[in-house]
Image (spheres, helix red, strand yellow):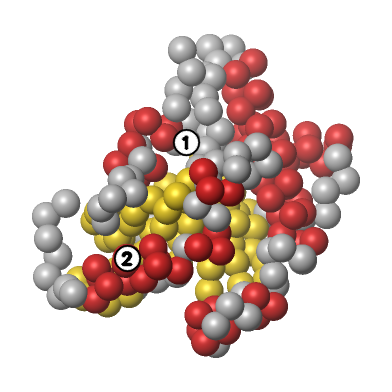
Amino acid sequence: MKNDPKKTLKHLYAPSARDISLVQVPEMNFLMIDGSGDPNTNPEYTEAVEALFSVSYTAKFMLKKAPGGIDYAVMPLEGLWWADDMSAFTGNDRSQWRWTMMIMQPDFVSDGLVHEAIGRVVEKKALPALHRLRYEAFAEGTCAQTLHIGPFSEEGPTIQRVHDFIGRTGRLGGRHHEIYLSDIRRAAPERWRTIIRQPCILAEQPPL
């Protein structure tokens, strides 16, 4: 039976589009690549995504074929977004955007396995972003999140809903986080499903 971490972590990866929920995001391990610039025009972005998925799938099949192997679903692409001058971010000046693209790795994917997977990808493909890839733990703590359905260009009102929700009891506390649940090569833009997550610092931490 295939292990699907999205189901194990359903409270983090299956939010409602109707409501905004508070979640406590624990420390998890990620493959990550940093970059900057417009994701629609900067080849660095496409190269980063290709490297992340190539290594993630290589690690998956290595573990599946190992003695007593585990079969599992590769997790979706995620992105942290910000700008050194946040007016460039809120004003949609994409040339000034900074980002970290990443894919969560389940606990049973070890550091050693990841580095062996990187080596195998290097042997087979000349991917320019591989040297920028890193594997590290990342924890966000308390976050507000909801599901946006539709194209990325229409996320603004959804993001504002999340910010308003946080503003009633606290303040923003980290980088804008998106989790891309849809394969945008196959799904129509009006059906794209994106988790909008925002770390926050609440005046009084509620029970989660």
Counting residues from the start of the chain, the first of labels 1 and 2 encountered is 1
Q: Residue at horizontal 39%, vertical 42%?
A: 13
Q: Return the x and y of residue 110 as percentages of the image width and height.
A: 54, 36
Q: Is residue 82 left or right of residue 144?
A: right
Q: Residue 159: which disc?
A: none
Front tag of 1 and 2: 2
193 or 97, nearer to the observer? 193
Instruction: Determine if residue 117 is in view.
Output: yes
Instruction: Determine if residue 179 is in view.
Output: no
181 or 52, nearer to the observer? 181
Question: Badge 1: how crowded within 10 Å, few (<14), some, or many (20+)?
Answer: some
Q: CA distance from mark 1 to mark 2?
A: 28 Å
30 or 201, nearer to the observer? 201
Q: Is residue 126 left or right of residue 104?
A: right
Q: Residue at horizontal 26%, vertical 56%?
A: 20
Instruction: Give the residue type at disc 1.
Output: Pro
Residue labelled with disc 2: 162
The number of numbered badges drawn on the structure is: 2
Q: Residue at horizontal 48%, vertical 46%?
A: 193
Residue labelled with disc 1: 106
Q: Return the x and y of residue 60 as percentages of the image width and height.
A: 61, 28
